[in-house]
Image (cartoon, helix red, strand yellow):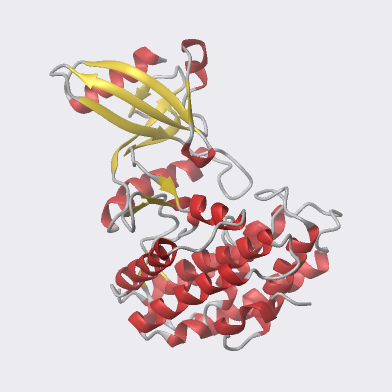
Amino acid sequence: MKSQLKGYLEKKFGTPVRIVSVQELGLGRESKKVEEHEIKGFGYGKPYFVEFETEDGELKEVVISTMKGDGFGHEHLSDRAHIVLWQHQAFNTLPKHVRSLDVGYFTKNERMESVSDAEEYFIVCDKVEGEEYVTDLNRLKEGGRVSEEDKERVSALASYLADIHAVKKDDPTLYVRRIRELVGHSECIFGLTDSYPPGSGLITSEELKDIEKKSIDWRWKLKARTKRLCMVHGDFHPWNVIFRKGTDFTVLDRSRGEWGEAADDVSSMTINYLFFGLLKTDGKELDTDFKKLYDLFFEVYLKKTNDYELLEVIQPFFAFRGLVIASPIWYPHISLGTRRKLFNFIKNVLEAEKFDYKNAEEYLEG
């Protein structure tokens, strides 16, 4: 496979190259060296860090990755192709997002080409230095003290969203589509409810059905608010933000649309402060340090945007994100107590006409 990789890089960059190393990237952005006999599996659902040298001695670093086929609307080649082709375009239009350098696909004989016998698509992006923001949250979960830098980073993230959300788009049908996708897309609410194993004892089919019904009601409440369409990231959570020194960061893996509802991004990040606040206490209560960070995020964001209407539309987005973090697929090792509080949050927030962010802990109670 290295010869095919070498040929692709030479064609893309217009110069002979020498492959220095190929490493598989894993959770936490750690990597392991890929040996020659492992290269055959290159590219199928995993990201790889490739270091190579050009003819004039310049050392370059890229990340090459594909999508994994799964039950969230990614089963078909065309599903994954749609997302990767869209990412290549959308990554480069969002401020501070890692840049996509190219998009292509693997052929049936494992060549990296761009012809009609495509077997699997891949995307090539710049390599980003730094650590995932979740590293900070894990440190606090394990008993670390909240520092000034922690608070500055929360403010920087909230301000970033305020800035990109200030860019509006007049396209009513697109807003309606995005709200429809929130409920019915395979990656969103219906896809998540279908992913819960039956008879697991975590949540009943009737409870999941009730969440779906209430989400449909919310779709009809929100679909007329088309003036809210704005620039979004689409999957703004702690694993998709890479911090370097201080508040210098880059975002990764923009998802589902360049334009959408601001509540999508706000809910995606803020629910993780609640989540880690429950993980710290093993589901007994919401940790006060994480609640302060959560409060700070909302205060900075609302002060900068004055978008208090957000509190009238964020409910189904919180339900979606709650279904993700409560899922035994995505988070198999969290306690039943933590999951139950998350299910309480989903049910209670869907009942709220206006979300009371200052008293979020009340939504966690049964």
Instruction: Say which quadrant the C terminus sits in.
Output: bottom right
From this view, report whether residue 312 is shown above or below residue 166.
Answer: below
From this view, report whether residue 131 is shown above or below residue 161.
Answer: above
Measuring 37% from the left and 86% from the top, which residue is drawn there?
Answer: 306
Q: Position of residue 128 (x, y in %)?
A: 34, 42
Residue 172 visible to the viewer? yes
Q: Between residues 161 and 66, which one lies in front from this camera angle? A: 161
Measuring 48% from the left and 14% from the top, which residue is drawn there?
Answer: 35
Question: Is residue 51 shown left or right of residue 109?
Answer: left
Q: Position of residue 349 (x, y in %)?
A: 65, 79
Measuring 84% from the left and 53% from the top, which residue is drawn there?
Answer: 200
Q: In the current view of this chain or complex, which residue is farthest to the left?
A: 56
Residue 117 visible to the viewer? no
Instruction: Say which quadrant the N terminus sits in.
Output: top left
Q: Between residues 284 and 172, which one lies in front from this camera angle? A: 284
Measuring 66% from the left and 60% from the top, which residue is drawn there?
Answer: 280
From this view, report whether residue 238 is shown above or below residue 59.
Answer: below
From this view, report whether residue 107 is shown above or below residue 343.
Answer: above
Q: Position of residue 67 (x, y in %)?
A: 49, 39
Q: Between residues 133 and 74, which one lies in front from this camera angle? A: 133
